[in-house]
Image (cartoon, rainbow, N blue to C red):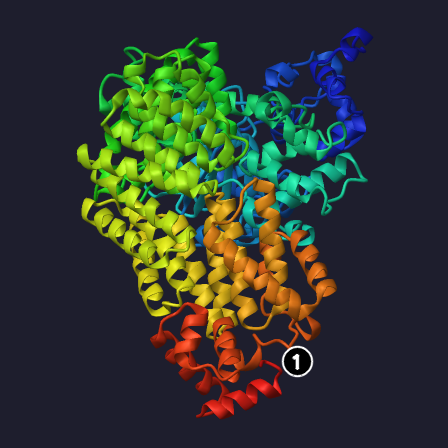
Amino acid sequence: MHVPNKRKNHSPLRTKRLQRQWSQRELAERVGTTITTVKRWERQATVPSPYFRMKLTALFGTSEEVLGLREAPSSEQGLLKEPHPRSSPERFADGPHLLDLSEVQRRSTLPSDLTAFFGREHEMAEMKALLQRTSVRLVTLTGPGGVGKTRLALSLTAAIADTFADGVCFVSLASINDPEQVLPAIAQALGLWETLDHPTSEDVEDFLHEKHLLLLLDNFEQVAAASLQVATLVRSCPHLHLLITSRAALHLSGEYEFPVPPLPIPDLAQLPDAQSLGQVAVIHLFVERAHSILPSFELTATNARTIAEICVRLDGLPLAVELAAARIKLLPPQALLARLSHRLTLLTGGARDLPDRQQTLRNTIQWSYDLLTPQEQFLFRQLSVFVAGCTLPALATVCRSQGDEIQEPLDVLDGIASLVDKSFVLQTSWEREEPRLLMLETIREYGLECLDVDGETASVRREHAHYYLGLAQEILTPLENVEQAIGLERLEPENANLRAALQWALEHQEGGMALHLSGALFRFWEARRSLREKSETFLERVIASSWSIPTQRQGKPLCTTSFLTSFQHSIEHLAMLSQEAGVVQREWAGSHQHAFSLYLHGYVAWANGDFATAHARAEEGLAVARAADEAILFAALLVLLGQVAFEEGETDQACALLEEGLARQQVSGDMRGSISTLSFLIRVLFAQDKESLARRRNVERLELSQALHYQWGIADGLTILGHLAMQEGNEAMAKERFDESLTLLREVNENGAIAALLHSAGVAVAAQGHLQEAVRLWGASEAMCRALGESLLLVERVVVVRGTVAVLTELGEEAFLTAWAEGQAMTPEQALAMLGQGSGSSRHKDTSPFEKNKLTTREVEVLQLLARGRTNAQIAEALVISLLTVKAHVRSIYSKLGVTSRSAATRYALEHQLS
């Protein structure tokens, strides 16, 4: 008797297959059987064996009931039904299908990979070593959804299967929600045929008791309550090894937890060329998946950086990267990157043979979120408001303001411990601070969605902003004294949160909060130079929003906020803002605010070259600061007067003022101000040929900068060391110091200082005769300044002008302009990479006065005057240096040339056309 066609055509298995648009042949290939068998299943002529039921449920991501795999057909269908004798140790010993896992069965229990496996060599090596230790019998791979735990486990199991006498067995728990079904699933995978009453735990234990076998349990998180059954199994079977994948550890005795991290992401600040970048695992994964969708897709020099940025934005999460690559047919890399601000909406459309929870990134995260307790979900949502992580006190403060779910610090501690355990949160340590809590950005985006759905966004972001305003104000006072370093370290990891708080205040017309927050952070942001990015414009928005605030409440914050814009905008823009701030500050005549306003106006005038106005404002400010007993401002105004004096050519007076200002800054504990003053003073000392004193001051500046973790100060000190090393002929050391400086300046996005670094390096290499290299560096420096709308300090511009005139004369106009154009087309890294690589014409060895026996530029000038018969006193007067300095230069020239008299030195100058 045949089953009616209607029944045949509408079996649940057939319906699910057609939904995936698979043929019967495709389904047969995916589960490892024949097309005839699939046809019999769909006609319901036979019920799949337990092994194939497991394969089918894993493939479709649903239960046996939904697939109709447990439906008992009528006897008229002639369904083959195997006997299922009660399991027993004796039966296991004699029954051929239960004796042990055959080679065929061992191969078939592991699903075959249809795609390549990338970038887990380190994890594979560690796990192989771990699992092959006889004392290690329970290992849990943990990590967030989509990180690749299952792929790693399958690859690992396949690689070490031969080391287990009885093979390996894979058990998918993805479709199981009932912990009581875990042992039956294991029994199915082992080939223990089920009876009407399922095999007991004793049956499974008896079967495995003598087996040397690796059992892989995949997706254990939703049946965590079955962990005690696993513990019993491990204790009862002395040769059994278990490898488990789960988003949370099982917390069993003898368990080894192995966190699976996302794939390493490239450093966007130091990207290699496209070919080398393609060897990075996460990039390789993206390119391979994109190529499978769009065969013409390739990694090129044009799209390499964009693809790297995509992978970085996706945290190196393999599932997210694969879903992004799947969009490449419609969206080219640049368009894809532009849409990643909404990752969860974009990253859908996974392979149809994957479980539903892996079809989209949102489903993957939601799968885990739904397994959390209500309190854990609450904590997860609150934590998502923090950018780049937070501390436990910060989270506790925000949580306590949101309701009754969290009231005690212990509640937060326990809840966070659980979220860390379940791979929602990463825990890192900050030096000398308590642990920081971090979320992957892909997971954080889901948390923000949940905040919106629950209507919590406004209140949570408000509390977040209030917390960081309080933190900044608390730390403000220490930043004014000797405890600066501690204060800066506390604020350093909170930079992103501070920006987010400011952004929220501006978006919600909280002008007062924005003004006071930016004012409180003046020292931190000035020290870190962290507002340099042209894309950020919120500081001028802060000032614009402040005019609605009563004047008496604006005070110092408005002045400091105006000053901060000098690190973002042109001097002209700062001048406009400082004048507006000055109108407000005048209402506090004789106060700190008044003195600060005068300093600000003087600084703007000095930067614009209006030295008369700068001098007048600084003198006026000194009087106000002295009357108001503002020690730090008084010192800063002295320094400003010193800067003005130097620009006006009064070098001795400049040094005296700078030294006095520096001494006062050190007494008042203004360490950051001391570093800034030292930086200018060192350049003035070099310009005066006071090299020994400049060296000592540079060491002092480096020590202070390192104590403060002040990267700009460290970088500037390294630049000076590079200059000195080049002057001593140690090109390798010079290049190393310049490169270190560039790396630090890149980290704080200090492009103006990078331009100054290139200029300084150019002066140094010119002094050694590498003229074309020098011109390239100057060209690169000038290009950066032009792009920033800025210029070098006058003390540096003077050196450049003098140097370029001399080099232009030496090289000739054509060679000079060619090298200049080459430099303007170079990145800073490319320009510095040329150091020490020039040869032939690039070094101009035969005619350059800079190259002769490694004489410095100043020594060449001294030698030229000496050869013209000038006395030491006349040389000192001509070069505006001291007599002692001239004598030191003469001794150095004699040593380098290998001569002992003025006549011999003069003869050398004549022979080399230096006279």
Q: Note whether 105 is above or below 502 in the view shown.
A: below
Question: 907 and 419: which one is in front?
Answer: 907
Q: In the rendering, at what x and y percent does residue 441 appear?
A: 50, 30
Would residue 602 be found to the left or right of residue 766 on screen?
left
Numbered-mark total? 1
Question: 646 and 345: which one is in front?
Answer: 646
Quadrant of the image containing the N terminus: top right
Question: 105 and 583: which one is in front?
Answer: 583
Question: 866 and 332: which one is in front?
Answer: 866
Q: In the rendering, at what x and y percent does residue 158 appear?
A: 59, 47
Quadrant of the rendered structure where residue 429 is? top left
Quadrant of the image containing the C terminus: bottom right
Q: Mark yes or no: residue 753 visible.
A: yes
Q: Mark yes or no: residue 414 visible.
A: no
State the residue at coordinates (80%, 25%): 23
State the residue at coordinates (35%, 64%): 694
Q: Note whether 809 is above or below 642 in the view shown.
A: below
Q: Note whether 10 is above or below 268 in the view shown.
A: above
Q: Secondary structure at mark 1?
A: loop
Q: In the rendering, at what x and y percent does residue 905 appear?
A: 50, 88
Crowd band around label 1 with a 10 angstrom C-alpha radius: few (<14), some (14–19), many (20+): few
State the residue at coordinates (24%, 30%): 592
Q: In the rendering, at what x and y percent does residue 541 appear?
A: 46, 21
Q: Note whether 915 is above or below 272 in the view shown.
A: below
State the residue at coordinates (81%, 40%): 296
Q: What amino acid type is highlighted by mark number 1? A: Asp
Would residue 688 be found to the left or right of residue 279 on screen?
left
Quadrant of the rendered structure where residue 236 is? top left
The residue where tag 1 is placed is 846
